[in-house]
Image: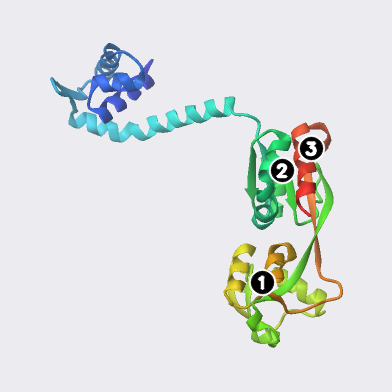
């Protein structure tokens, strides 16, 4: 029926307010228009939707039934139209992807500086490196701080920062046999700890007791501060704790394990797109 979507929208507004006058105010139309919409809908359906009285309108049984059927759909269409309008008028936004820990600790404190430098809003996207790189290729992210080498066609990447890893625990655990200290891990398969053990101790981390799994390195740090056990964390995440003595290192290798971070963009966008290039340049200054 031509114009029926407007009629349904009017019907839902009248149903919610119980008043033709109030519905007209909310919709920004005249009361006569509201009345004609309701009457046209009733005529097309073949039954009354409201009982009229001097104090307003009340829905009939058929009106209540129709409301249950259409209100959610009408609201969804309204929301979609609003979002489409916002998208059409919204300013350019730069999407920066990376591990939650890296972006939260090393970028968020300087986010205003980044926004001022590129003069666009910034949207941080947390996730795993492979997922973020997929998003980069799909155009969902503009710049990715990747903890793995981005060996993908269509992605340009430069190494720009080496994460140093340290084996740490609360001071009470210092001097204890490592196999007697519970491990607070990022994942059940101990990915960071396994790499550290092979690099520093030249063996797999067998014989360790798993105390807890917390899939966020900031949460692992909090667990260590609470005395839960030991873990391997990036040095930037615990630098202040080590300086203050609230955490201590349990090993002192001559060459600490490192992991290289890469700054990844699509193709040559870091050169051809001023916003992407500005974001990438600013991130290189921030993450040190």
Q: Nearer the viewer, residue 70 or 167?
A: 167
Residue 157: % across, % down = 82, 47
Is residue 283 among the parts visible in the rendering? yes
Is residue 141 among the parts visible in the rendering? no
Disc 3 crowd rating (10 Å Cα; few below 14, some 14-19, many 20+) is some
Q: Nearer the viewer, residue 2 or 115?
A: 115
Q: Name the residue under label 1.
A: 189
Q: Residue 136 carries which label?
A: 2
How many circles with numbers are drawn on the protein?
3
Q: Element type at marker 3?
A: helix
- Asked if marks 3 and 1 touch (Cβ < 8 Å), the reply is no
Residue 235: % across, % down = 74, 65
Above or below: residue 96 compared with residue 161: above
Residue 178: % across, % down = 70, 84
- Residue extending farthest to the front is 244
Q: Element type at marker 2?
A: helix
Above or below: residue 98 compared with residue 208: above
The span from disc 1 to disc 2 (Cα, nearest Å) is: 28 Å
- Asked if marks 1 and 2 touch (Cβ < 8 Å), the reply is no
């Amino acid at each position: 029926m031509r114009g029926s979507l407007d009629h349904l929208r009017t019907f839902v507004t009248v149903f919610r307010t119980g008043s033709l006058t109030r519905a007209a105010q909310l919709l920004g139309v005249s009361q006569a228009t509201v009345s004609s919409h309701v009457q046209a809908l009733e005529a097309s359906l073949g039954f009354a939707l409201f009982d009229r009285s001097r104090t307003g309108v009340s829905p009939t049984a058929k009106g209540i039934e129709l409301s249950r059927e259409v209100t959610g759909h009408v609201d969804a269409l309204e929301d979609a139209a609003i979002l489409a309008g916002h998208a059409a008028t919204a300013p350019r936004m730069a999407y920066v992807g990376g591990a939650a820990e890296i972006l939260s600790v090393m970028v968020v404190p300087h986010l205003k500086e980044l926004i001022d430098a590129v003069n666009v809003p910034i949207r941080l996207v947390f996730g795993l490196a492979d997922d973020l790189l997929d998003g980069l290729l799909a155009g969902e992210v503009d710049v990715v701080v990747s903890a793995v080498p981005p060996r993908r066609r269509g992605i340009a990447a430069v190494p720009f920062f080496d994460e140093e890893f340290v084996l740490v625990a609360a001071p009470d655990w210092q001097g204890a046999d490592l196999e007697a200290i519970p491990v607070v891990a990022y994942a059940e398969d101990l990915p960071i700890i396994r790499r550290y053990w092979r690099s520093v101790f030249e063996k797999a981390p067998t014989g360790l007791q798993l105390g807890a799994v917390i899939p966020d390195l900031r949460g692992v740090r909090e667990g260590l501060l609470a005395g839960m056990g030991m873990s391997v964390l990036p040095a930037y995440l615990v630098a202040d704790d080590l300086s203050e003595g609230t955490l201590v290192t349990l090993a002192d290798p001559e060459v600490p394990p490192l992991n290289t971070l890469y700054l990844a963009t699509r193709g040559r966008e870091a050169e051809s797109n001023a916003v992407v290039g500005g974001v990438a340049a600013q991130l290189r200054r921030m993450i040190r």
